[in-house]
Image (cartoon, rainbow, N blue to C red):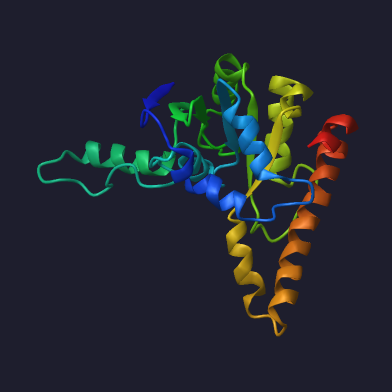
């Protein structure tokens, strides 16, 4: 596991993720100012970020800890050989480009007075990777955590149930690895949600109707994800409803 300390302290007033959330009406009953107050009263928090490959896990990590983190599939090194490089070295670099985030990476920082540890995990459901090894490592290192963020791209065109959906398979494997308790302090994060604007931008409708259409997409996600968790992954109803 790689460990990467970041800035010693992040001023909450300068943290764009907090500011952005506080300025948005995220959902009925979600009060980000109250959440921020409770966060400030904590001494420390440990967060595991996981999900399928390419769902913005490292970008989310970047937003939380306030530093640049390589995303799955991002270029970590140039795949172009340098002058006098051996062909083997060029191939190794190209392979690294394909692998993206290849190990569980731990980041530590302080947000305000709160010590924050974030684990950015390799993407699941990638047949080129040692998924069983990743899951074993996650269980060994991340069992004691306060929060799990499971990332799903909000721009997926269809919400498919069953094993045809890689997210369902990944969720099931996480549940079998950690037990259903994995979901007790878990939040499913719809990443790339800002891109939903493009889906409704060209609707021939007034702005308020476009916002309504975007919200309907998010509401459908919420509905279908609850069905998937309760019926496909067999998570107890009390845990699903709590989240």
- The answer to whether any part of residue 24 appears in the image is yes
Split into 4 quadrants, where in the image is the N terminus? Answer: top left
- Residue 62 in the image: state x and y as whole percent: 45, 41
Q: Residue at x 44, y 45 (%)?
A: 14
- Quadrant (top left, top right, bottom left, bottom right) of the C terminus: top right
Viewer-closest of 182 and 137:
182
Q: Residue at x 43, y 28 (%)?
A: 109
Q: Nearer the viewer, residue 62 or 55?
A: 62
Query: How many numbered markers are drawn?
Result: 0
Q: Going by the picture, which residue comes out furthest to the bottom? A: 204
Tell me the residue at 59%/60% (across/down). Answer: 194
- Left or right of 127 on screen, residue 240: right
Residue 119 x/y as whole percent? 51, 28
Is 227 above or below relative to 184?
below
- Whether 83 is drawn above or below 171: the answer is below
Instruction: Find residue 172 and report its image quarter.
Output: top right
Residue at point 58%, 55% (across, down): 192
Left or right of 213, for residue 238: right
Relative placement, left or right, of 26 versus 119 is right
Q: Position of residue 37 (x, y in %)?
A: 63, 34
């Amino acid at each position: 596991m790689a460990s990467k300390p970041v800035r010693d302290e992040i001023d909450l007033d300068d943290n764009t993720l907090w500011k952005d959330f506080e300025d948005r009406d995220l959902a009925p009953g979600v009060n980000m100012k109250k959440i921020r107050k409770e966060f400030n009263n904590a001494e420390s928090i440990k967060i595991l970020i996981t999900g399928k490959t390419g769902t913005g896990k490292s970008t989310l990590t970047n937003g939380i800890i306030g530093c640049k983190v390589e995303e799955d599939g991002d270029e970590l090194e140039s795949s172009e050989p340098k002058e006098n490089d051996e062909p083997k070295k060029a191939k190794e670099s190209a392979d690294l480009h394909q692998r993206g985030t290849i190990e569980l990476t731990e980041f530590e920082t302080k947000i305000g007075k709160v010590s924050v540890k974030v684990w950015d995990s390799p993407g699941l459901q990638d047949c080129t990777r040692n998924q069983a090894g990743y899951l074993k490592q996650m269980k060994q290192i991340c069992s004691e955590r306060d929060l799990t963020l499971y990332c799903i791209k909000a721009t997926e065109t269809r919400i498919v149930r069953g094993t045809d959906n890689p997210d369902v398979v990944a969720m099931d494997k996480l549940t079998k690895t950690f037990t259903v308790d994995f979901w007790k302090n878990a939040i499913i994060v719809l990443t790339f949600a800002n891109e939903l604007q493009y889906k409704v931008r060209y609707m021939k409708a007034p702005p308020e109707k476009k916002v309504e259409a975007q919200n309907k997409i998010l509401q459908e996600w919420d509905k279908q994800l609850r069905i998937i968790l309760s019926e496909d992954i067999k998570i107890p109803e009390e845990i699903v409803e709590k989240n």
